[in-house]
Image (cartoon, grey):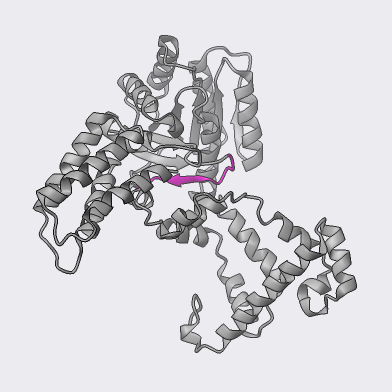
Amino acid sequence: MFQNLSEKLESAFKNLKGQARITDLNIANTVKDIRRALVDADVNYKIAKDFTDRVKETALGTKVLLSVNPGQQMVKIVQDELTALMGGTASDFSISGQPAVILIAGLQGSGKTTFSGKLANYLKTKKGKSPLLVAADIYRPAAIDQLEVLGGQIGVDVFSDRENKDAVSIAEKAIKEAKAKNKNVVIIDTAGRLAVDEEMMNEVAAIKKAIQPNEILFVVDSMTGQDAVNTAAAFNERLDFSGVVLTKLDGDTRGGAALSIRYTVNKPIKFSSSGEKMDTLDVFYPERMAQRILGMGDIVSLVEKAQEQFDEAEAAKLEKKIRKNQFDFEDFKTQLQQIQKMGNIKDLMGMIPGVGKQIKDLDINDNAFTGIEAMINSMTLEERRNPDIINPSRKQRIAKGSGKDLAELNQFLKQFDQMKQMMKMMNKMPMGRMPGLKR
């Protein structure tokens, strides 16, 4: 995500390397390179020019700080302007009402149905709501099937009426159903087309008029760049939607949609989504996204994801085991599973400052831990809890059971032993100095 843009912005800042201060002369090339980087990322030229004009104006009006070099000052200015361009702060999401009604709109293929499932899961697991998903796409039976499958995966009811060819009627019946079953949020997945057309616009506008939703979310495939922004403008003219959702941020996106859409329609980006897993939905924070674009990582989001999987009681037990040098394969497997629950491994690593650039060309599969788990699962309970008893004959059995060769198993056992040795060294540190552990 945004990898090319990040690299080109980094290159632009190098124009100021070795300069004592920001001047009209040395900033000219930097601003030109930033504008070119934005246009290459599929940002509309007018938006890119307005952006760089503001950057230049701010830079030349900034008081020179002796302790900060011009390059660092420019990075901070661009970060602030990127944050403002994408909305400044995270936007509120209205789920008050009995029930609250959320209307989902967008083109076919933008990820509306998958997002609807993710939103239901988010509201259920993180907000304590009882949502009802509504299949209001009367043209594609497969869309109804998909929503029912997603609802089954996350344990959320789905309302559908396959014989009814009136989307407005379906939406109205679903709201009555929600009230009868004490559902406090209704999420209506509407039909999409391959392109904007009058029939689709009239239908979704009629649904809006009939149900008066709390939120209307326009779902954008972020990989479509400027086309997505143009489509958003057309939808907004008819629907006056309340917010935007960026999907497929894990794809090969240049970033144009994320950087342009707020400027174009003056509506906030409320959520971002990546991948197909139901837990890969994030509230959109403009400042954090700006930091990631500039290669600064996103430690705050990484910590939040970790805290969602954090079990204080389990952490205390694990600390005691580390203290006693009793960390075993059972503990290791538990930690791997918690990491996997946090989301896409490469995206998580990219949130660490400086790491994203280093791993950009690496193919890090989400199933990277599968082989390790297979080796651990092929061990007996006694072997997992007492790794020291694993002798050559046991190794042969474990390797065969996990489908790995002996060399791979030996490498894994060696790495695990090295990790335990490092933990042993940490045990010698004073309690208060041990990283991540409380005094």
Measuring from the top left, give residue 96's x and y in whole percent.
Answer: 40, 40
Q: How many marks?
A: 0
Give the prevailing secondary structure in the magenta stretch: loop
The answer to whether 43 appears left or right of 353 in the picture is left
Does residue 303 appear left or right of residue 369 in this picture?
Answer: left
Residue at the image point whose x is 52% and y is 13% from the top: 166
413 lies above or below 63: below
Residue 280 belongs to the span the image colors magenta? yes
* Residue situated in front as seen by the camera: 80 or 237: 80
Q: Is residue 159 left or right of residue 15?
A: right
Residue 411 seen in the figure: yes
Place residue 262 in its image quadrant: top left
The quadrant holding residue 424 is: bottom right
Position of residue 25 measured from the top left corner of the image (x, y, whole percent): 12, 48
Depicted 152 relative to depicted 297: above or below: above
Q: Residue at x 57, y 14 (%)?
A: 139
The span picked out in magenta is 276-285
Question: Can residue 439 be seen?
Answer: no
In the rendered image, residue 300, in percent from the top left (x then y), is placed at: 40, 59
Q: Is residue 221 magenta?
A: no
| Residue in the picture at 54% in, 42% down | 130
Residue 57: which quarter of the image? top left
Q: Nearer the viewer, residue 32 or 157?
A: 32
User: Is 349 above or below relative to 187?
Assistant: below
Residue 263 picture location, percent across and down: 26, 34
What quarter of the picture does the N terminus occupy?
A: top left
